[in-house]
Amino acid sequence: MIETKKDIYNYKYIFGPVPSRRLGFSLGIDLVPFKTCSYDCIYCQLGKTTNKTITRKEYVPINQLIHELEQKLTEKVKIDYITLSGSGEPTLYLKLGDLINNIKQRTNIPIAVLTNSSLLWDDDVKNELKNADLIIPSLDAGNEDMFRYVNRPSKDLAFNKVIDGLVSFSNLYRGKIWLEVFLLNGATSIQSEILDLNDIIKKIQPARIQLNTVKRPPAESFAFTVPNEQMLELSKYFDGNVEVISDFSRQADENYMKTTKEEIINLLKRRPCSLDDIAGGLNRHKNEIIKCLDELLTNEKLIYHEHNHTPYYSIKKTTLHI
């Protein structure tokens, strides 16, 4: 009897586990369509928002999410966190609370939620997040003007409403909160803006303050990286447990990363590709591809450029191997 190769399960909404600087091996669950978000941040590594909204819907059938998760858990891969994040704002998912409770019934793996904080004023969202183990909300601006400049929020969102929601949630939530603060050179990195941010953070009192900056090609060319030396210096202006996560050492599975990087290099040897081209060509989730593109760009294996407002990646002629 000839043994046939088992079919590879085709995941549509689950990706990874992806090596993460903060969460170890993170199994991502994508809850909304690509670039469905309440913000259109100038630094976003996924590009410009195509569906800016604060309307909560069951964008993805919850039964399908649970089915995919059950299948992934049978593979017995290393998973440190199940992370609700993906290609847009996860709190826009109407059945977020039901999903978290369903995951809890199936595994003891902790659940992390990465959110831009924009809907934490909503009592339903607050209640749905209560059973998650870790919330990583973001705070990118300390005042209305910078909020409008950096986050470019939905017209239905006011700065004070978002901040009041974030502070209120932090007072109610009993799990861990790691607050991500994204700094941009020449904008949120100047001292007056840092002081505004710190005034808000003192009201939130997160377990960790995690400073980040642009490391991957951003949505807008005027979103500038803060050099690492300056990030370390700016960290001194914040009250609390501060980490510069843009400089974390990677905890990547080298075999996983090496294979994916080799596949990307082989694809780009043929022609320049966009993120969509690479993800589609390799049948991988965009968030998995971005991790590897980040490292390849850092190691100067690739060139990043734009054509007709679409970002493309191409191989450096000197790149012969990884």
Image (spheres, rainbow, N blue to C red):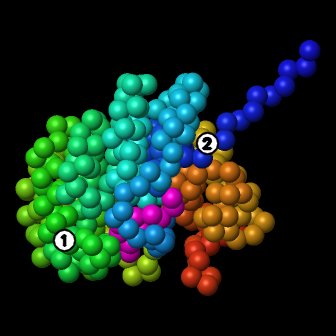
Q: Position of residue 85 (x, y in %)?
A: 41, 50
Magenta span: predominant SS is: loop
Asked whether the viewer can see residue 301, the reply is yes
x 44%, y 80%: residue? 221
Q: Which residue is mark 1?
A: 159
Q: How many angstroms separate mark 2 from mark 1 (CA)?
A: 37 Å
Q: Which residue is mark 2?
A: 11
Q: Position of residue 57 (x, y in %)?
A: 41, 55
Secondary element under disc 2, as helix, strand or loop, is loop
Q: Residues within 10 Å of mark 1 (few under 14, many from 20)?
A: some
Report the residue that reaches farthest toward the top. 1
Q: Is residue 316 shown above or below 16?
A: below
Q: Is residue 73 shown above or below 82?
A: above
In this picture, residue 77 sits left or right of residue 225: right
Viewer-proximal residue among 73 and 269: 73
x 20%, y 72%: residue? 158
Q: Quadrant of the N terminus?
A: top right
Asked whether the viewer can see residue 45, the reply is no
x 39%, y 25%: residue? 105
Magenta extent:
33-45
**Label 2 sits on what residue type?**
Tyr
Secondary element under disc 1, as helix, strand or loop, is helix
In this picture, residue 316 sits left or right of residue 187: right
Q: Position of residue 311 (x, y in %)?
A: 58, 74
